[in-house]
Amino acid sequence: MEMNHSPQGFRSFLRRKDIEFSAKRYGIEALGAMAQGLFASLLIGTIISTLGQQLGIEILVQIGDFAKGVTGPAMAVAIGYALKCPPLVLFSLIAVGGAANSLGGPGGPLAVLIVTIFAAEFGKAVSKETKIDILVTPLVTIIIGVLLSMWWAPSLGALANGVGKTIMWATELRPFLMGILVAVIVGIALTLPISSAAICATLGLTGLAGGAALAGCCAQMIGFAVMSFPENKWGGLFAQGIGTSMLQMGNIVRNPKIWIPPTLASAITGPIATCIFQMKMNGSPVASGMGTCGFVGQIGLYTGWVNDISAGTKTAITAFDWMGMGMICFILPAIFTLIFAYILRKIGWIKENDLKLNL
């Protein structure tokens, strides 16, 4: 491997290899891709297997289990794709993701994220630098990735799991205050160009805290969808309501005040979820950060109810459960956001076309 050891030569080498040490590359692009990997394995697998259980179709249960079984590799490949890995590096990350997720335990997603980044960048560094690239590149990527998994993954997994359990414990202890904090913070993360789903999955956020996180995400998505309806009509309603509120980031940069209504709505719906409806997300943690995107959050809630019934901690799905889902995920976010948006439009903080999207 030829590399100039001067600072300028090293920077030139990194540019040639497309290795970029930045918060954007690792904290936004890699994290966001990891959420897609989670969705395409654990989350969709959970949905398929739950559907199979409810309909009594065993083949769907098996399909879902196979999808869930490749969660680690799916996350790693997604991260590698975001880091623009060459094919040999990308394919080698399958083994790395499997090792990191398995050894990381409940906090496996955090281990996968960090270990995969290191393995991918080392793999990229040696890629096509020798005449036996087909041996060297996967060898370096897999050995470094698996060794780091063995070294780091248990501690990283325990750290993420500990933080998640602390948040969930605090939410059980102080449901009103934590309902506000969790809903607002995770909701904001959903609209920012980072992944709220990956954050919830990494921390294993379930229970009341997961319900608060879901409330915050729904407030952002439904909130922006309904308050921008005059500008964006039905296309904008569906794009944001079951797509993503991230579409508004450009408008938020131009006028941050448009973010106030849905954020205030999340500060209200969060504690209503925790204190009144006691809405618990006991499905997959990644669903806590999905909001109404493809109705994944609501499917996660339902899956959690089914899991609780199977575990004997819940006797049945009640009308109050369904009312809580409808109020927290759809009705209250729309009402509160429209009220706050009306006030801000009246005082001139939000003006015509401030929420306009190019759809």
Image: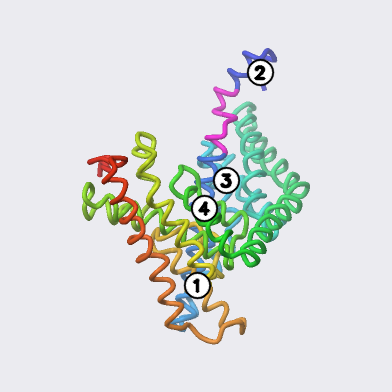
**Residue wearing tag 1:** 276
Q: Compared to 355, does 285 lie above or below?
A: below
Q: Earlier in the sequence, mark 4 or mark 2?
A: 2
Point out which mark residue 3 bears. 2
Residue 118 left/right relative to 90: right
Asked whether the residues under the numbered discs 2 and 1 touch, taking CB atoms below 8 Å apart as contact, a structural biologist would say no
Tell me the SS state at disc 4: helix
* Rendering coords of residue 33 (x, y %): 50, 46
In three-dimensional space, the C-alpha distance between marks 2 and 3, rounded to whole angstroms, equals: 25 Å
Q: Earlier in the sequence, mark 4 or mark 3?
A: 3
**Residue wearing tag 3:** 91
Asked whether the residues under the numbered discs 1 and 4 touch, taking CB atoms below 8 Å apart as contact, a structural biologist would say no
Near mark 1 (Cα within 10 A), the count class, few <14, some 14-19 or many ≥20, is few
Split into 4 quadrants, where in the image is the N terminus?
top right
In three-dimensional space, the C-alpha distance between marks 4 and 3, rounded to whole angstroms, equals: 32 Å
Q: Nearer the viewer, mark 2 or mark 1?
A: 1
Q: Write the start and end of the magenta stretch as one range.
A: 14-26
Q: Nearer the viewer, mark 1 or mark 3?
A: 1
Q: Amino acid at mark 3?
A: Phe
Look at the magenta stretch and give its main secondary structure: helix
Colour convention of the picture = rainbow
Asked whether the residues under the numbered discs 4 and 2 touch, taking CB atoms below 8 Å apart as contact, a structural biologist would say no
Q: Earlier in the sequence, mark 1 or mark 4?
A: 4
**Residue wearing tag 4:** 186
Near mark 2 (Cα within 10 A), the count class, few <14, some 14-19 or many ≥20, is few
Split into 4 quadrants, where in the image is the C terminus?
top left
Q: Nearer the viewer, mark 4 or mark 3?
A: 4
Tell me the SS state at disc 2: loop
Q: Amino acid at mark 4?
A: Val
